[in-house]
Image: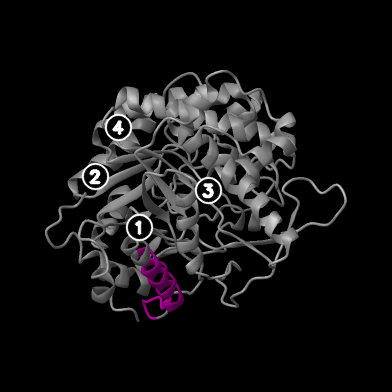
Amino acid sequence: MTDPKILAARFPGDFLFGVATASFQIEGATKEDGRKPSIWDAFSNMPGRVHNRDNGDIACDHYHRLEDDLDLIKSLGVQAYRFSIAWPRIIPEGTGAVNEKGLDFYDRLVDGLKRRDIKAFATLYHWDLPLALMGDGGWTARRTAYAYQRYAKTVMARLGDRLDAVATFNEPWCSVWLSHLYGIHAPGERSMDAALHALHVTNLAHGLGVAAIREECPNLPVGIVINPMHIYAGSDSVDDQAAAERAFDFHNGVFFGPVFKGEYPENFLSALGGRMPEIEDGDMATISQPLDWWGVNYYTPMRVGHDPAEGAEFPATVSAAPVSDVKTDIGWEVFPQALGDLIRTVNARYALPDCYITENGAAYNMAVENGAVDDQPRLDYIAEHLSVTADLIAEGYPMKGYFAWSLMDNFEWAEGYKMRFGIVHVDYATQVRTIKKSGHWYRQLAAEFPKGNHKAG
């Protein structure tokens, strides 16, 4: 086992250790206190979309177990908690009436964190779009960006004075490509045209959200959480190298470019720009407002080769074979050095602010045995990725914190309850929480911070 004291010594004293969750994955109570359905409620209840037709109706019952779960976070000794806010609790129809009971819940959450001296990192959008907005086209409709702006302003007016940081979006790659092109996440579209509209509307909503946050809370650090793919070419061939570059533009550049440079990648626009929605005057300036920080969610690399099929649509790639034979239970290749390669690559291409690793973790499905969960592979995974993070800090990259995904086992989207990412085990029948071996180890690591002459920052 990696000695937490030895690992801790490689980090600055003000490095932030936290845990992360998302509203739809843990809260449950989907029909209570004025909340109305999200696209994930609808998607989960359609046969063939989610493993076992699992849904978020109960999940981890966090809505009813809030105080106990906050005590659990405190018991892990972490300094920060990253959570998301459910838009359908705040403005249940997406537009229109504000639901005070929804805001009350997050009031209790944030106040509970403050009482326990835990920093509050809020994410405004983690995929649970109010279902009513699908009548306008959901994320393919420009109106949704303005609905999001009002939602962001509403949340900030109520909670912003007690937050430590806020992110506009979590993993737009998922809510754009995975949801509108590949059909794997809600709303389950499989249309490049729909995806291209969702791409620009999401980027615009981010920019409008930044403006709304700054207007309400000028001193609150605002950022965005991205899950960039670190892309390796399947071979040294010219074709595969070119494919990897196209894949970078398609999977990363379409988010980093607009947000950090005010432009979409040239190759992407030349291939697909004619199918994009109208980019109106001022859109790119809105999208590219300077940010205080960004979050990286990293789990596994992407390996691609050139797709030789005639008429293959941009980025015209095929999957290439993994290099490591180590895989998590969800089938993802374990390759920690890709995290380092990723951070070096995006920093070389863009002028980026401070970075937090806002999600990193592994799906391993060990059960409770004799009151304990021996998830050594998860512990090793987290330790290896933290070791890479320490290397990045030594190289001068502004890595400021690490949030383990996830605080507890939860609803894993299309995988339902089959996959477990938590450092705390949840028995879904009884809702009993059991801290896993990885959680006990993470607590030992977090206990070393803040340290030295630094203050928690």
> In the image, which disc is placed on residue 159?
4
Between marks 3 and 2 in the image, the one whose residue lies nearer the viewer: 2
Label 2 or label 4, whichever lies nearer to me, is: 4
Task: Bin the neighbour count of mark 4 within 10 Å (Cα to Cα): few under 14, some 14-19, many 20 and up.
Answer: some
Number of other residues with Cα within 10 Å of mark 1, as a class: few under 14, some 14 to 19, many 20 or more: many
- State the CA–CA distance, disc 4 to disc 3: 25 Å
Question: In the rendered structure, which amino acid carries the disc numbered 3?
Answer: Gly
Labelled pair 2, 4 in contact (Cβ < 8 Å): no
- Main SS of residues in magenta: helix
Kindly tell me whether residue 148 is visible in this rendering.
no
Q: Is residue 390 left or right of residue 247?
A: left
Q: Which residue is mark 2?
A: 112
Question: Between tags 4 and 1, which lies in front?
Answer: 1
Residues in magenta? 370-389
> Counting residues from the N terminus, which is met first, the one under dot 4 or under dot 1?
4
Question: Which residue is nearer to you in this view: 144 or 357?
Answer: 357
Mark 3, residue position:
56
411 versus 300 height, above or below: above
- Contact (Cβ within 8 Å) of mark 3 with mark 2: no
Q: Which one is closest to the eye, mark 3 or mark 1? A: 1
Q: Which numbered disc, 1 or 2, marks the residue closer to the eye?
A: 1
Q: Which amino acid, by three-letter code, is at mark 1?
A: Tyr
Counting from the top left corner in percent of width and height, residue 312 is at 82, 49
Q: Which residue is mark 1?
A: 402
Foreground disc of the pair 4, 3? 4
